[in-house]
Image: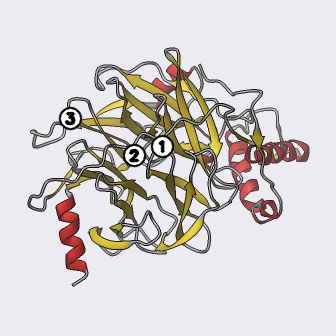
């Protein structure tokens, strides 16, 4: 059951001069939605050109703006704490680094936006979407698994298609997109994924499905209702954080009429689930957050930037995500590209990002030993002029090993595994 809580305190934010700056973007996004429903009676044909009635266009633009001005929802009850893995000093050993393709024999011209999680038995499970091109109707979300003792990933198979999503959700689905996979403490495997019914990615919705048999079968998907205004423009890219009440804090983002970092709160509701969201900030440029808890109540969110500053930014919470500080720029570049970050079991922070202001032709790792205040580049995972190494996703398994999956040339998904000793070795080599 999706619920939008009523009778709770709200904190609204002001939409002012930013609307004037973003007017062109609002119009473009709304017209994209309009174009997808142009066959409705909301249009008039003048010769061979189809045009929108000014009143209808104005209403849609107003609703797009209103969806961004919807107040942040704050629970009246105490906010559950973040669950962080127990600190662990990894036993000494030789540096370890291994890389491989997950879908090296893929027949699809395009593969993009991977995530990876750990199953209860220690196997890895990875998802991504693939098809003829991004946004095409033949794109599907694929799953592959790999046991620690196995030398290769299982043959990928589609777990969500446009047709299956349409059937489950009982609505027309134009395309599917980003997905994030994760396991709960009871052995359930969860998948949050994006669908679009009209327009582009700004017309997206989030959906949830679960597997009780480690990915062999899946429950019918459920659409998450997070806004009363069309319920559009909610996307996901990075991993969730477990909560002390058994729920999850999922970093998500909004792209219609401005970009906003948000948190999706998924909480158990007597065998069902309850979904609400809160906004990290009222800013217009930071989005696609990577959520890294420092302890039960403190966390930071690293943000992708689409402003002219072309710098990563960071926001912080001291109360388990109830409120966030205004995003502050970091001295690290960002070419308006995805990133990910996590706190390692030894307490240090690890960041995977494109170290450039104008391209995605490198993928680097940086570390912070002071809770994200300063960062040190420690390793280059991939680098090639003109290439595309993008959308990194990080995860540390229970044995302390770090796993990174990312898009390779938009053609395949690459998996990299390494240990803390390798990070220290690379760090020491870079400072010589």
Q: Earlier in the sequence, mark 3 or mark 1?
A: 3
Q: Is residue 110 left or right of residue 198?
A: left
Please tell me whether residue 4 is drawn above or below residue 48 in the rendered image. above
Q: Earlier in the sequence, mark 3 or mark 2?
A: 3
Q: Is residue 176 left or right of residue 155?
A: right
Name which quarter of the figure residue 217 lies in.
top left
Query: Answer yes or no: do the residues labelled 1 and 2 have beta carbons within 8 Å?
Result: yes
The dot on residue 68 is none
On the picture, is 96 further left or further right than 373? left
Query: Which residue carries the number 1 mark?
Result: 136
* Total labels drawn: 3
Q: Quadrant of the C terminus?
A: bottom left
233 shown above or below 284: above
The residue at the point 62 percent across, 51 percent down is 280
- The residue at the point 34 percent across, 36 percent down is 142
Task: Work out which residue is located at the far right of the displayed protein and give it.
Answer: 55
Q: How far apart in space, not on screen, are marks 3 and 2 (Cα)?
A: 33 Å
Which numbered mark, 3 or 2, is in the foreground of this view?
3
From this viewpoint, is residue 48 visible? no
Marks 3 & 1, CB-CB < 8 Å contact:
no
Which residue is under mark 2? Answer: 132
Query: Circle 3 is placed at which residue position?
Result: 122
Residue 386's image quarter?
Answer: bottom left
Work out which quarter of the rendered image holds the N terminus and state it.
top right
């Amino acid at each position: 059951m999706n619920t939008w809580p009523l009778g709770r305190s709200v904190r609204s934010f002001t939409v002012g001069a930013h609307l004037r700056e973003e007017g062109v973007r609002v119009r473009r996004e709304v017209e994209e939605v309009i174009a997808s429903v142009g066959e409705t009676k909301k249009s008039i044909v003048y010769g061979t050109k189809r045009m929108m009635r000014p009143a209808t266009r104005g209403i849609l633009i107003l609703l797009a703006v209103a969806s961004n001005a919807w107040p942040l929802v704050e629970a009246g009850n105490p906010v559950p704490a973040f669950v962080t893995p127990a600190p662990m000093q990894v036993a000494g050993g030789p540096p370890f680094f291994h890389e491989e393709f997950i879908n090296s024999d893929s027949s699809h011209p395009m593969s993009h936006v991977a995530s990876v999680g750990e199953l209860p038995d220690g196997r890895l499970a990875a998802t991504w979407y693939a098809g003829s091109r991004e946004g095409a109707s033949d794109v599907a979300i694929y799953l592959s698994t790999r046991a620690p003792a196995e030398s290769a990933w299982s043959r990928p198979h589609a777990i969500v298609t446009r047709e299956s999503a349409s059937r489950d959700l009982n609505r027309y689905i134009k395309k599917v997109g980003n997905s994030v996979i994760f396991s709960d403490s009871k052995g359930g495997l969860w998948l949050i994924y994006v669908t679009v019914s009209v327009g582009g990615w700004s017309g997206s919705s989030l959906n949830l499905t679960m597997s009780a048999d480690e990915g062999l079968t899946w429950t019918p998907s459920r659409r998450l209702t997070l806004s009363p205004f069309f319920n559009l423009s909610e996307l996901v890219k990075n991993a969730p954080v477990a909560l002390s009440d058994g729920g999850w804090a999922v970093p998500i983002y909004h792209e219609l009429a401005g970009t906003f970092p948000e948190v999706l709160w998924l909480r158990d509701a007597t065998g069902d689930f309850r979904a609400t969201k809160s906004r990290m900030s009222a800013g217009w440029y930071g989005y696609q957050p990577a959520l890294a808890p420092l302890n039960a109540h403190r966390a930071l969110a690293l943000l992708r930037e689409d402003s002219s500053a072309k710098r990563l930014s960071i926001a912080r919470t001291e109360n388990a995500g109830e409120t966030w500080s205004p995003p502050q720029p970091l001295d690290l570049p960002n070419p308006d590209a995805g990133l990910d970050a996590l706190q390692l079991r030894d307490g240090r922070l690890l960041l995977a990002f494109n170290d450039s202001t104008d391209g995605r032709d490198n993928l680097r790792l940086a570390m912070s030993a002071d809770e994200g205040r300063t960062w040190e580049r420690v390793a280059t995972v991939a680098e090639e002029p003109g290439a595309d190494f993008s959308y990194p996703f990080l995860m540390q398994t229970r044995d302390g090993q770090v796993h990174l999956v990312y898009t390779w040339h938009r053609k395949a998904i690459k998996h990299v595994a390494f240990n803390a000793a390798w990070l220290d070795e690379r760090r020491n080599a870079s400072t010589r």
